[in-house]
Image: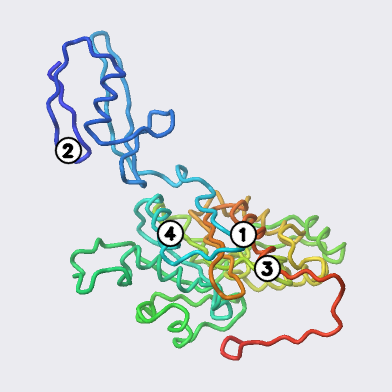
Amino acid sequence: KNSRVTSKKGSSKPWASDGNTSIMQFQRLLLKQSGARLWSQSQRIVPSFPHSYYYLSQSNSRSSTTLQLQYRSMSTSDVPNLFCSVGSDRKAISDEQIRKHLSEFLNALGEKDEVLILPPDYTRLHSQAGKITRMICEHYNFIPSQDSPQGQGEETKQKGPEIEIMPALGTHAPMTQDEILKMFGEELAKKSSSFLPHDWRNDVVTIGEAPAEMVRKATHGVVDRPWPAQLNKKVWEKRQRPRSLVLSVGQVVPHEVMGMANFNKNLFVGTGGVKAINLSHFIGAVHGMENMMGRKSNPLRDILNYASENFLESQLDLWYILTVIAPDLSITGFYIGRDIECYSAACDLSMRVNFTVLDRPIKRCVAYMEPEEY
């Protein structure tokens, strides 16, 4: 009797009962007043904002029952490990659809203080990772959005997190300003101080080791020592910051050393160190490129997966945004996830889109390499 229903904004509305109202009826009233909806069969109640929810708690005393509706931010653990899995070998995915999936995903993660994006470098220009990186930055108001109305003032935009972009160079040379402009666009090129070059010789830390027996198996006994899991220090430091997000962006495509490119390769090789990179390439060569190409499961990938599962997944708020690119350079697959399920789904589509299986070996192969890219 004589209760008040309080909304998430702090305002309250009077509500009176005849004393016979059931707990269930009162729950329904709270839902109606808050404009929220029930999350599954639990006591979580979700409003229209995907990155937050209402929580209904109940306490009992001799004379009354108290129900409290609290507004909380959704944690990463509330977001499914495979957030987005869209792909077809017959139909391209539009930029509008990509932007929609990205927006839903980033909203679901909630507010962040820092975002570190790990796209590939210019040698992977056609991965569309430059465009996706640009869309992420637009979502966080780091650069003007192409969808924003002309003349929209900066004061109308909500301040976003600090954003840094570290191209996963591996052993490649740092990107030039001209390459950044061509891959990421004019607005991001203006933010040159936000691009961090990866130094594979000096800026790395070893975060763990894959057992020697895994390396011995992968190399048929040629190498009998652990594989060091190495990362750029800047990436690894993000584990100490509770509202930091790491986004690894790139294309799943056939790869002669890894079988299929991307996923945790973008971390352990793209932002890895000299020991890890050299040994991983040697493992791939000894195992045999003809035994690696196009195989999502292989001994070298098992080593990287071991490092991910034991050293990365519990330490970093790390998500993979993966594409599959058709021969006409359109995006035909788009996947967002935080574990191997995301990568596996992208590999399955890439096998259909990026492979031509021949009945017999070829005698001569002529390959054209794009001068601007290589």
Q: Residue furthest front?
A: 90
Real-space Cα separation, disc 3 to disc 2, in angstroms: 54 Å
Q: Which residue is mark 4?
A: 102
Residue 129's place in the image compared with 228, above or below, is below
Which badge, 3 or 1, is on the more N-terminal residue? 3
Q: Which residue is mark 1?
A: 346
Which badge, 2 or 4, is on the more N-terminal residue? 2
Which badge, 2 or 1, is on the more N-terminal residue? 2
Mark 4 neighbour density, 10 Å: few (under 14) some (14–19) many (20 or more): many
Real-space Cα separation, disc 3 to disc 1, in angstroms: 25 Å
Real-space Cα separation, disc 2 to disc 4, in angstroms: 31 Å
Percent position of residue 325, x then y: 58, 69
For label 4, the SS is: helix
Name the amino acid, label 1.
Ala
Please give the label number shown on residue 10: 2
Q: Going 41% across and 62% down the picture, which residue do you hit?
A: 99
Percent position of residue 176, x then y: 48, 86
- Using the rendered view, name the quadrant where residue 60 is placed: top left
Q: Which residue is mark 3?
A: 276
Real-space Cα separation, disc 3 to disc 4, in angstroms: 32 Å
Name the amino acid, label 2.
Gly
Residue 326's place in the image compared with 173, above or below, is above
